[in-house]
Structures are given as C-alpha cells and as structure tokens.
C-alpha cells in the first residue's frame, strides 16, 4: 500500500452491518468523487452483509475507473462476495440450503 492510497474504514463510514443496494451506491458515489485513483476499503469491524449490498458493491467496483482493493475482510463477508461473483460452487449452495426435490 502506498502513501497515495486512500483507506476507507467501511464500518465507520457506512455501518458494521452492510445492507441495501442504495447504501452501496452512495458509498461508490463518494469513492468516485475522490481525487485519489487508488482506494483501499478496510472491512475491519464489519459483522454482516446482505446479498443485495454485496452484489451492488461488486457491480459498481467492476464499472469504476478507480483501482479498488479490500483488506481485513472477515470470512463470512468474503463468502457472500464469492456467492454473488459466482465463485462459490453451486453444489455447496445446495448443501447449505438442504434443497430436496418434491415428489408428486
């Protein structure tokens, strides 16, 4: 990390519980307004995240002209990002939900 990076403590700037697409959009609107091109999002202190927030965050990150990276991301938060970015094996999703077909 260089001194030209801007570090954003997401638990302080947004919340410890990340929810709603609108909140992710507001975060990225703020990020896009910064002069720095290198942004580091620090997930220290974040305890939960919704699928909606993770999905919108991922979409906005992909479309951003900024170089955005994350640090200190808890494993439960990383798993949600993996799910929305289709990096999580579909078979594991089925195991988690214990989906069983209904026989008629």
Image (cartoon, rainbow, N blue to C red):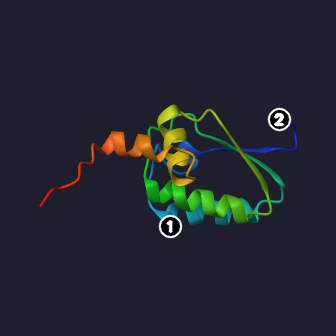
Residue at image position (66%, 66%) is 29
In which quarter of the view is residue 41 placed?
top right
Q: Residue furthest front?
A: 104
Q: Is residue 86 above or below residue 72?
A: below
- Mark 1 crowdedness (10 Å alpha carbons): few <14, some 14-19, many ≥20: few
In the rendered view of the protein, which quadrant contains the C terminus? Answer: bottom left
Q: In the displayed structure, does residue 6 sit left or right of residue 87?
A: right
Report, in whole angstroms, how far the alpha carbon at label 1 lies from the one at label 2. Answer: 29 Å
Residue denoted by label 1: 22
Question: CB of mark 1 within 8 Å of CB of mark 2?
Answer: no
In the rendered view of the protein, which quadrant contains the N terminus? Answer: top right
SS for dot 1: helix
Q: In the displayed structure, does residue 77 sit left or right of residue 67?
A: left
SS for dot 2: loop
In which quarter of the view is residue 3 placed?
top right
In which quarter of the view is residue 63 placed?
bottom right
Q: Where does the image place residue 12, in percent across and percent down from the top left?
A: 55, 44
Residue denoted by label 2: 1
Residue at image position (58%, 35%) is 73
- Mark 2 crowdedness (10 Å alpha carbons): few <14, some 14-19, many ≥20: few
Q: In the displayed structure, does residue 104 sit left or right of residue 8?
A: left
Residue at image position (53%, 43%) is 11
Q: In the displayed structure, does residue 100 sit left or right of residue 56?
A: left
Q: Where does the image place residue 95, in percent across and percent down from the top left?
A: 34, 39
Q: Which is more N-terminal, label 2 or label 1?
A: 2
Residue at image position (61%, 57%) is 58
Q: Is residue 58 above or below residue 6?
A: below
């Amino acid at each position: 990390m260089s001194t030209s990076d801007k570090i954003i403590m997401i638990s302080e700037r947004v919340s410890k519980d990340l929810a709603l697409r609108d909140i992710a959009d507001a975060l990225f609107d703020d990020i896009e307004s910064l002069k720095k091109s290198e942004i580091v999002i620090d997930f220290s202190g974040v305890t939960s995240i919704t699928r909606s927030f993770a999905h919108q965050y991922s979409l906005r990150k992909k479309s951003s002209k900024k170089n955005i990276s994350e640090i200190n991301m808890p494993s439960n938060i990383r798993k949600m990002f993996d799910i929305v970015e289709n990096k999580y094996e579909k078979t594991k999703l089925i195991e988690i939900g214990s989906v069983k077909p209904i026989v008629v």
